[in-house]
Amino acid sequence: MISNFIKKNFFTLLLVPYAVGTIGILLPLTRALFLGLTPVMLIFSFVLVVVEEGKWTRFNVFALLFIFAGGFFVEFIGVNYGYLFGDYQYGTTLGPKWKGVPLTIAMNWAMLCIASRSLVNLVTQHKALSAFLAAAVVTAYDYLLEPVAIKFSWWWWDEGIIPMLNYICWFGFSFIFQLCFRKVPATTGRGFWMIFVHAIFYWILLLM
């Protein structure tokens, strides 16, 4: 089965595409091509994490769908009204958009919630504490991602300044979304490695 193949070859499937992608972006000749593959890599990352994290009961699936919908909704409010996060707009690099929000962004919210929860479960499985720590991980992830995203026009801020409200909202909504997992058993997969691979990838791009 595909799921067994992914679990067996998780690290290879995780590292090789990002290594190739990094080289492709570093080379001026292929940079535009590989930057255009950004939404494909986000979808691929999402599938890897979801499969790796194992059993998905009906409750888990509904929680994941809620996070996907909730992530899209808060981004919709932010992009179109500026009430959340600040005044910002998305570029075209992240794939098809609806109402100004790339669909991959909603998926990214879900992926980050799963991966951060997987990481935090290595430290504690207390529901409230794990939700708090996972939200902090997601917020730190966004802090690292922001300068890279601006550099490659994944999104941009209207005045070129990232407001503190952005990080407050990232933490607050991440915490709420993490509480959706309050009945989900502790994950035993390796999805948290996605966060570290992304972090290395972003730092390399930032130093270009």
Image: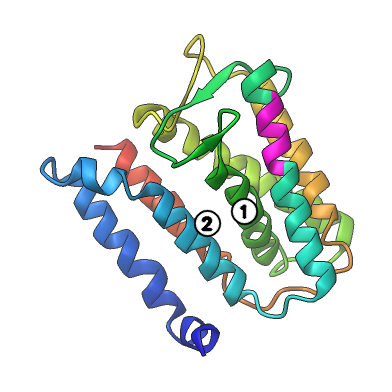
**Residue placed at 74% from the left, 51% from the top?**
67
Q: Does the magenta stretch include residue 152?
A: no
- Colour mode of the rendering: rainbow
Q: Position of residue 23 (x, y in %)?
A: 20, 54
**Which mark, by number, is residue 2?**
none
From the image, tell me which residue sits under label 1. Answer: 112
CA gap between label 2 and label 1 equals: 8 Å
**Residue placed at 37% from the left, 76% from the top?**
12
Q: Where is residue 120 in the image (x, y as percent from the top left)?
A: 70, 62
Is residue 34 shown above or below 77?
below
Q: Which quadrant of the structure image shows residue 71?
A: top right
User: Which amino acid type corresponds to the residue marked 2 in the rendered image?
Assistant: Ile
Q: Which quadrant of the structure image shows residue 15?
A: bottom left
| Disc 2 and disc 1 in contact, CB within 8 angstroms | yes
Label 1 environment density (alpha carbons within 10 Å; few <14, some 14–19, many ≥20): many
Task: Give the main secondary structure of the magenta stretch.
Answer: helix
Q: Nearer the viewer, residue 4 or 65?
A: 65
**Residue placed at 52% from the left, 36% from the top?**
97
Q: Among all residues in the image, which is located at the extreme left?
A: 29
**Left or right: where 61 falls relative to 2:** right
Q: Which quadrant of the structure image shows residue 58?
A: bottom right
Label 2 environment density (alpha carbons within 10 Å; few <14, some 14–19, many ≥20): some
User: Which amino acid type corresponds to the residue marked 1 in the rendered image?
Assistant: Leu
Q: Please tell me which of labels 2 and 1 falls first in the chain.
A: 1
**Left or right: where 51 falls relative to 114:** left
Is residue 35 shown above or below 159?
below
Q: Does the magenta stretch include residue 74?
A: yes
The magenta stretch spans which residues? 71-77
Question: Which of label 2 and label 1 is nearer to you?
Answer: 1
**Which mark, by number, is residue 195?**
2
**Left or right: where 115 falls relative to 179:** left
